[in-house]
Structures are given as structure tokens and as C-alpha cells.
Image: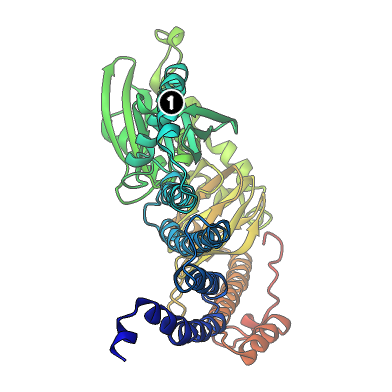
Amino acid sequence: MTDVFRDPTAGWAAMLVVLLPLVIIGSGELEERLRQRDSSLQRPIAAVRNWVLPLFAVWALVRVLFDASSTNPFVQLIASGLVVALGAAALAALAIVIERIRDRGRDGRRSVPRLLLAFPRLVLILVLAWLLIAGVWDVDLSAAMTALGVTSLVVSFALQDTLGGIASGFTLLADQPFQPGDWIRADDVEGQVVDINWRSSRIQTRDGDLVVVPNGQLAGATITNFDEPTRLHRVVVPVQVAYVNSPTDAKAMLLAAAESTPGVLSDPPPNAVVVQIDDPLMGYEVQMWVDDYTIAPRVKSDFGSLVWYHSHRRGVPLPSPAQDLFLWDGERSAAVGERDRASLLRGLRTSSLLDQLGDDELDQLAGAAVSARYANGETILDPGDDDMVLIERGSAQLTVDIDGHPTPVLDLAASDLATSLARDEVLGHGVSVVAISDCDVITVRADAVGGAISRSVDLNAAVEQITSSRRRRVHRVVRRARLERDAADAEALVAIVDAEASPEPGVDGTAADRAPTDDPGTS
């Protein structure tokens, strides 16, 4: 009995008869559970159960129990299959690890280059090949390694530039100064990184062209990454303003244009500094912050357009051409640029409501009116502003602020009158007038408008009707937005449809509040 336990053949026989079936059954149960959970580990477990364990059993039976020679072709074939099966299971398990590492880049963390991820797989394949050739088939690789070394030396001299680029690619991938999706500048190339491999990097420029840059060139270049460490980027625009303007007025005009430019951040706020003092002009530098470098050209363009509008509205003239230096008269030019009362009076008469007033009353309104030009997207009247505007040219829109989002209420065209409507105490929302195209407007002060309305019964009634109608529109838009926001079931959705299909009473239920919602005459 003691001799049985000391015999190594008996141990192998016990393992094949008892232990191996248990392992096969256990791996089968594990594979089924992984399949039910749709786990990625099912594939390597299935390879071990279906190929590794049976081939190992055959190899152990022939090699150990039957004492077959390791040089026997049949034994070598079985061992080769076993090595290949082990390699397939190991590669399947390694693929799962590599996929999880690759998923880190999708979570916002820095991704690992694909070349580095492929390196462990390459090492594993080389080890398996060495085991198969030298271990199983007993082939001496020393002569082949010597020949390979001499050949590699010759090839390295012939391909030293290419190999240098490959080495630079490895260095670039290890250092990771940028990754796909980043916007970079490398010497004369600027664009978004599309792909990085072991030899070159592909960069798409603003013109839509794809530039392939060798990694050797990038390794020696000065690289600017506009997305690292943050996407915050400062856009600097030089602007020249006429010398007659005080720096305070000029900076206020430039900052107002910067704050109105789409895409410019309020934190950090824009800044304007003086960089040149030289009659007949002063040079300023406007610094604006954006969180996306790709919009920098558009921000510069929009800012330049808004500077022109704000310059004319605020009376801060830009520099005149140099040949007009000795002919320019600031006061006279400013006076010529202003509209006279007769021109303003003709503009006010384009409104069918204001045309009801007498000449004296219209003349008083013209004396309290100023003309201005607004660009698309600029706010003409802020919430709570009591002034009245007349759209001479272009189109505008009444918008109500709901949860920080401007929502359209009513479109305004040429000859329409508009006020911002006083802030509603019940709803707590203010209404603005925003230009939706380039607009020429006449703004009349609130005190002059109030006096004219109080002296004209017809005008007072018409303005009240328009104001009530627009206020009902605002109420309906706000209520609809609240219903859409709070709609969590079918009843809320039905309420939205009913609110749109049926006329809605006013806030206090008066007859005026039940008037049609369409504005008569001037909208």
C-alpha cells in the first residue's frame, strides 16, 4: 500500500481519474453562470474547459502513464495543441484586461495608447512561439538568433530614419503630450488630433484638410495643447479707438461688446487694457475667455461686428482714415451723425398708433427720442425698462426668461412698438426685447411716453389693449413651460393640449383679459 502512494505514476493516474473530471465539471458550471450573466470571462473559461483540459489529459496519459518519449511525433503534436490552447485562453483573458484599460479613456481619464496596449499581446505571442519551437519541437534557436542579430544590424543601418521615427513614436506615446480629440499647434501645423500611431499622427486643420505629421518631427517640435490642462483659453483682440474718446468711455464700450459676444465667458470676465497712446488713435487690447479653442475665430469676428454697433450707439467713434487726419472735426462729425428732430418725427409717424397724436405731442416725443442700431442677438430693452421702442428697420422678438432660458413670445417687425412689460409680480418673470436681425430703432424715454398716453384717450386705450394682450401671451408661455417641466404622467400632457386648444382667461378674469390674444395693428 505504501508503494502505491510512493509511485508517481499512481499520483498522475489519481489526478486524471478523480481531480480532472471534477475540474471539468466545475469549469462547466462556472461557464454556464458566466453565460447567464453575459460576462466577458465566459470565452477564456470555455477555452480552458473545451481544449486545455482535454489536451492536458491526453498529454499526461501518453507522456506520463504510457511513458512515451518527448521526441515522439504524436506526443509533440499533443503538446503543440496544448500550448496553442493555453495561448488562446491567455489571449482571450488578456483581451478582457486590455478592453477594461481602454474603457478608462471613455470615462474622461487619460487613455492608454493603442501601441502600448498591443505590446503585452505581442510579448505573449513571442513567448508561446518560443515554447512551441524550442520547448516542444526541441529546435535550437541559437543559430537563428545569431543570424537574426546580424540581419537586424544591417537593417537598422539601412532604415535608421524609419527606425528613428518609430522610436520617436514610442517616446511620444509614452509621454502623451496630446491625445485624439485635442486641439494642438506644432510648429506650422494647427488642428485637431484625429489619430496617433507608432509612425505618425494625423491632424485635421481648420480648412478640413488632413495633415499626416511624422512622429519624429513632432518629437522635436514645440507643441501647444489648447485642451490641456483645461479647455479655458484667452482670446486677445487688438482694437484702435479714436484719440478723442476718454479711456473710461472706450473701455466701457469695448467691454460691453465683449460681454455681448456669444461664447465669451463671464467668469473669468473680459478685460480691456491700453497698449498704445498716439494721436489720432489709442490702441486697446481686449482679453476674452472661452472654454473651446475651436470657436476663437468666430468670437473674434462677432466681437469685431459688435464693436461697430456699440461704437455708434455709445458715441465712441473709431479711428478715421489717416488721410482725413487734418480734415476731421470731431464735434461737427458727431453732430452730422446724429439724427435731427424732423427725421425722428418722420420715423415716429410710421407707427399707426403714434400717428394718432397731434403734431405738438409727436414733436415732444421726438425731443425725447434717440435712434440706435442693434445687431442680431443684442438686447434692445431689458426686463423692467419702461422706455418704448419703435422698430424702424429689421425685426425683433419679445422673449420671457424661464429658468434662465429666453423663450420667444412674439415677433416684432418694422413699424411695431414694443415695451419690455413691467416685471410681473405673480409670475416673477421679466420680458425683454431682443433683435433677431440688424435693427434700426427709435427709443423714447418713459416719462415722455407716459405724458403722451395720459393726454390721449385713444392712444391710452390702444396701448392698454396691446399690453394686456402681450401679457396674456407671456402668461400662456410661462404656464405651458411649467406644465411641460412638471409633466410626469398622461394627465399633465392632456392639460398641455387643452391649454393650447382653448382660450385662457387673464390673470384677474376681467373682460379685457378675455380679449383676443392677437395684437391689433402694430402687434
Q: What scheme was used to colour the molecule?
A: rainbow
Residue at 47% of width from left, 56% of height from top? 387
Front-most of residues 343 and 219 = 219
Q: From what the image shows, is residue 355 above or below residue 156?
A: below
Q: State how many labels appear.
A: 1
Q: Which quarter of the figure is the N terminus placed in?
A: bottom left
Q: Which quarter of the figure is the C terminus placed in?
A: bottom right
- Residue 263 is at least partly visible in this image: no
User: In x, y percent, where is residue 181?
Assistant: 47, 45
Q: From what the image shows, is residue 410 above or below residue 193?
A: below
Residue at 53% of width from left, 79% of height from top? 485
Question: Label 1 amino acid?
Answer: Ser
Front-most of residues 411 and 38 = 38
Front-most of residues 499 and 441 = 499
Q: Residues within 10 Å of mark 1 (few under 14, many from 20)?
A: few
In the image, is 291 to the left or to the right of 78? left
- Quarter residue 243 falls in: top left
- Residue 127 is at least partly visible in this image: yes
Front-most of residues 297 and 124 = 124
Residue at 35% of width from left, 35% of height from top? 171
Q: Disc 1 designates what residue? A: 152
User: In x, y percent, where is residue 157?
Assistant: 42, 17
Q: From what the image shows, is residue 268 above or below residue 483?
A: above
User: In x, y percent, where is residue 88?
Assistant: 53, 61
